[in-house]
Amino acid sequence: MNFLEVLRTAVFALRGNWMRSALTSLGVIIGIAAVIVMVSVGQGTQAEIDKLVSGLGSNRLDIGGAGGIGGGGARMAAGSRYTLSDGDATAIREELPEVQYVAASLRGGTQVVYAENNWSTQWQGVQPDWFDINDWTIGSGQGFDPRDYSGAAKSVILGETVRRELFGDEDAVGQTVRIGRVPFTVVGTLQSKGQGGFGQDQDDLVVVPLETARRRLSGATALPPGAVQQITLGVGRAEDLSYVQGEVEALLRQRHRIQAGEDDDFSVRNIAEVVATRTQTTRLMSLLLGAVAGISLIVGGIGIMNIMLVSVTERIREIGLRMAVGAGPADIRKQFLAEAMLISLIGGAIGIALGIVGALLVGRFGSLPVALDGQVVALAAGFSIATGLFFGYYPARKASLLDPIEALRQQ
């Protein structure tokens, strides 16, 4: 029997009991669709993590205040007291050669006003290395010069969102905006970064020199001299991160006169460890989802095997007749294997279509990120073919090994 004859015979056999064939392929449909949706969600989540890494920088440490001791010995809430200073940043810069960049910073919320337009945003008071650590690039105008940092100049750099909301298509450089009640001159704008890894608008900010923020924007908070909210470090080599973290903690404990056994009044966050933990969690979740989808596919394959075994039992006399008129074991094996493959392929095609639609719907209406590509579809198609071959072979082989004489005796 040639290929076309085998295919025609398989189609005729399946059409004779199309409802059973459709229900048999349902397991494959669900399994293939689940594989596509689950893998697409896993890849989309990994892409979001990669975006997070690129936005935060993988070779960095963030140091923040962790609260202190209040009156009467009661512990204050984390962040309720400023425990870091720009002197700490200077000490880290001078004593740890592995640290490439150091930037202390302050931040807060404010209204920025230009003419009749105003916008609620966040301000950042920064030191020069802050731009390199956070991978910010000046889009137009210029950055701060050394005199801006040392003289508390009323200069500001706008993020793209703030620039767009205040100026529209106008050139913002050289214009005067009011931050709170203080007039500032726009010296530059930042290139757009778009949405961050946590879904925030990275461009919704304004940047001023640290001393400017301390003197002109943080007056109501009664900051201690030299106080900062955060110190960010950029380490030259990723392999030095753990060493630098330990050295920074030891240096700050010494500078803050923290005795052995006492809690730190600061916290050090290793971005690489945070990202690695999230990546590992995502990988495990993707494996779990893939396993669930794989189980669905196996269940569908077992359904195909079961129905094909039932079909062999029901068609023993037909098999005997075919052998009696010259069909060999290989012909019988091809026929039943073709039927199993046809069920699997039809189910796979429908499953691929449903999987693509499902992944697109999850990406559009769900909160999970989705990355659908051709390799996922090709993988699903390969699973469909493999399912038909694997689970259809045993029933086909069983049919080909029947004795023609015994088969013809069956009623």
Image (cartoon, rainbow, N blue to C red):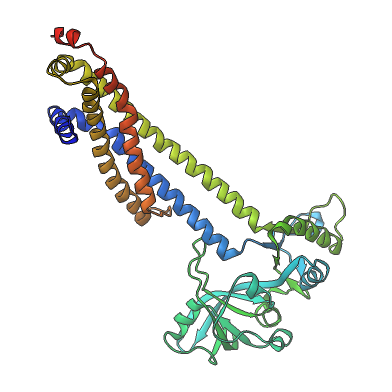
Relative height, residue 114 to residue 311 (above, below): below
In the image: residue 208, left or right of residue 310: right
Residue 69 visible in the snapshot:
no
Residue visible at 15% across and 9% down? 410
Q: Quadrant of residue 216?
A: bottom right
Q: Position of residue 352 (x, y in %)?
A: 30, 45
Q: Position of residue 59 (x, y in %)?
A: 66, 62
In the image: residue 15, left or right of residue 50: left
Q: Nearer the viewer, residue 237 or 244?
A: 237
In the image: residue 381, left or right of residue 279: left
Q: Quadrant of residue 370?
A: bottom left
Residue visible at 17% across and 8% down? 405
Residue visible at 80% across and 59% down? 247
Tally the marks: 0
Relative height, residue 281 to residue 159 (above, below): above
Q: Quadrant of residue 275?
A: bottom right
Q: Position of residue 146 (x, y in %)?
A: 71, 86
Residue 344 visible in the snapshot:
yes
In the rendered image, the quadrant that contains the N terminus is top left
Q: Nearer the viewer, residue 399 or 175?
A: 399
In the rendered image, the quadrant that contains the C terminus is top left
* Residue that lies at the very extreme toward the bottom in this rendered image: 174
Q: Nearer the viewer, residue 178 or 345?
A: 345
Q: Position of residue 102 (x, y in %)?
A: 72, 71
In the image: residue 369, left or right of residue 145: left
Q: Nearer the viewer, residue 182 or 57?
A: 57
